[in-house]
Image (cartoon, rainbow, N blue to C red):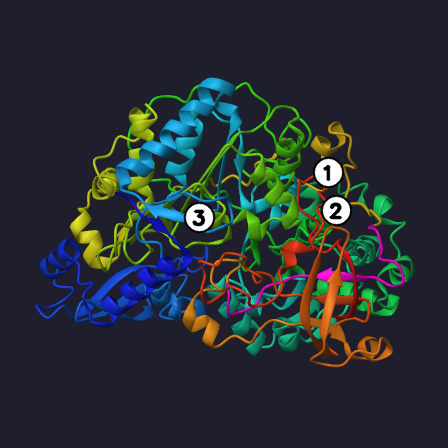
Amino acid sequence: MTSILSRRDFLKIGAASAGALALGQMLPAKVAQAARAAGLINAEGDGVISTMCEMCVWRCGVLAKIKDGRVVKLDGNPEHPHSRGKLCPRGQSGLMNTYDPDRVLTPLVRVGKRGEGLFRQASWDEALDIVASNMLKIKEKYGAEAMVFSSTHNLSQVQFENLLYAFGSPNYGTQRSLCFNAMITAFQLTYGVEEPSRKYDDVEFILMVGRNMMEAISTSETSELAHAIDRGAKLIYLDPRYTKTASKATEWIPIRPGTDSAFLLAMINVIVSNELADCEFVKQYVVGCDDLPREMSRYTTEWAEKITGVPATTIERIAREYAAAKHCALAHPGWRTSNFINSFQTERAIATLNAISGNVLKPGGCLSAELVSEGAGLDAPPQPPYPRISALRLDGTPWKYPLVPLKLGVFQELRDAIITGEPYQAHGWFISRQNPIMSLPDRAKTLEAFGKMDFIATVDIIMNDTAWFSDVVLPEASYLERYDPLLPVDGKAFIRQPVIEPQGEAKSALWIYKQLGERLGLGDYFQYEDEEDYIRQQLKPLHVSLEEVKEKGYAEMPEEKKNKEITFNTPSGKIEVYCETLKNAGFSPWPTWEEPPMPSEDEFYLLTGKVAQHTQFGTQNNQLLHKYSDEPRLWMNTKTATSMGLEDGDWVEVTSQVGTAHSILLATEAIRPDCVYLTPGYGHISKGLKTAYGIGASDSAIHATYTDPISGGQALSQTFVTVKKA
């Protein structure tokens, strides 16, 4: 007889698990045996095992220290190029994600209304049977396209996509349109690569637009930037907010939000009209160089001053300093660039600045646009071709957004289609390692879309907000408890391997997708016996055993043969500052100015951004990070606050066109008077998160949905809000 699991019972189970851990009762049987055989731990269960972090998508190498069968410390692996022997605060705290007392450790099936938090425990067989039967029921009645699949970027994503494409649904939601669609789409159209890599060894001048690198997740690049600054490289930083990166910059420019492209276009005008570009490189490798001065001529520094608020003399000086650095100058592509509907044009201007500096391909150049194929050189389990999919995608890719790559999509647009039932109605949602209720703008709209679903299943390690509103929750093993597919980095294939046995009944994603695939009649797409067999199949071309890789932490990859001929993966084979593809799609073929909307006199720009202590929406329940994080407050310029009769520490009400949130006020000089800032990732509504519940305000509750028509990026800072004393 099954029992109903209330929130109180749910939390008791978590606490009991934590107690067991405190007693050191999590020594793995299979893991311990394998580690002892490899000489990684001794008979007492002490030692060090190599694996990879998953506290963000940078995936640093980790050395997990084991004592008495427990993980007691995580250190950076000096052999891994992302960690280089160091870990950030999030990486150091990763063991508390595994030992979180709120972990979901058994499959759960909802028995109350969605959002009530009433679940019962179930066996894996029962839970998987429920998920598979509901998915098949939806497929038979409405077609495979009536199932939506969504996941964030992760190492097991290839098997998540196997499940999606084998099932036959076109509807794939990724987080990328909330983050870097503008950057990827712009650089694909200009250089033919998703994201160019940056090199800081010889950099002399860095222009960074809103990329708060010093609090970002790309830790190794952050270190390279810091070293470049230490040896004298100049950093010019454009951001309406004084961030940690601004504090390290040579010059901070608090530019008006949404006007970065005007600043950059004026820089380009200065450089090309005064013949300061690397003309030899441009003539040989850039399409559009002859007409670029004419096209940029209208973007004068005086014009840009009126739009950006930055003096024309400042823009002129920075443009000349950038040009003087030649190929040792870098206009950073950014990352979370989808902040306004003109962000694509900002990224096109950044791509153009790099092109005319000649910093690509040259020895000592600061930008690399070489094509890198993730997973090249490794094998994969065999599988049949995917069924043909003819149904339209609900997110409008590509029928509404023709230039957005299919693997990026336009996640935020899914909900309108779900709510309206146009072009057809979705009925089910399968979600893995993602929290759309928190991450998508306009949380009320996401909850409305959830209400249209006949069935929702979530795979995660904790009861996040999305799991709280799901019908079935499948508990995944944490990254310290599971295998994932190998990750090639800089000529080595690194392994994520379990350093302890999975707690409770948690399972790896590779196991979950295979089991579910077999129940859906898709077993031919998951031709591996278990996780170790999967990795052994990957390793076949390298002629190295899994045991060797587990002991060493990585396998050497064969050296890649590089094409000596310089080409770019564009229709012309060159850098396309002038882009015929854009012209054919009805957009400007040149980087161009697009005026963004402005708030009214009583409104503010709502800014968002990262903090060093947390990764998006997934780490707020981590007890170590919570302990060393202050409760987030709404930033407002001190003079603005005083003029409104507000004081530091006041409770304020923040209202947009889609919702209201309440926050404590932080009055500070570190932000423009026309802006306010709210740290994302707080305001969780799941009562299954005992640590994070009730802490801070949710920016997702007040962000409105605006989509860039070219890249499909969500314009996160185009939401305008009013603020008053609560």
Say whether residue 144 is magenta: no
Indicate the position of residue 195 as horizontal and vertical percent values.
56, 48
Alpha-carbon neighbours of circle 1 within 10 Å: few (<14), some, or many (≥20)?
some
In the picture, measured across the screen, residue 382 lies left or right of residue 342, that is left
Range of residues picked out in magenta:
596-614
* Residue at 31% in and 28% down: 519
Looking at the image, is mark 1 or mark 3 earlier in the sequence? Answer: 3
Q: Is residue 722 above or below residue 113?
A: below
What number is the disc on residue 433?
Answer: 3
Tag 1–tag 2 contact (CB < 8 Å): yes
Q: Quadrant where the C terminus lies?
A: bottom right
Which of the two discs, 1 and 3, sits closer to the camera? 3
* Residue at 76% in and 37% down: 589
Indicate the position of residue 626 as horizontal and vertical percent values.
47, 72
- Element on which disc 1 rests: loop
Tag 1: amino acid = Pro
What number is the disc on residue 341?
Answer: 2
Q: Give 115 or 616, whichever is nearer the viewer.
A: 115
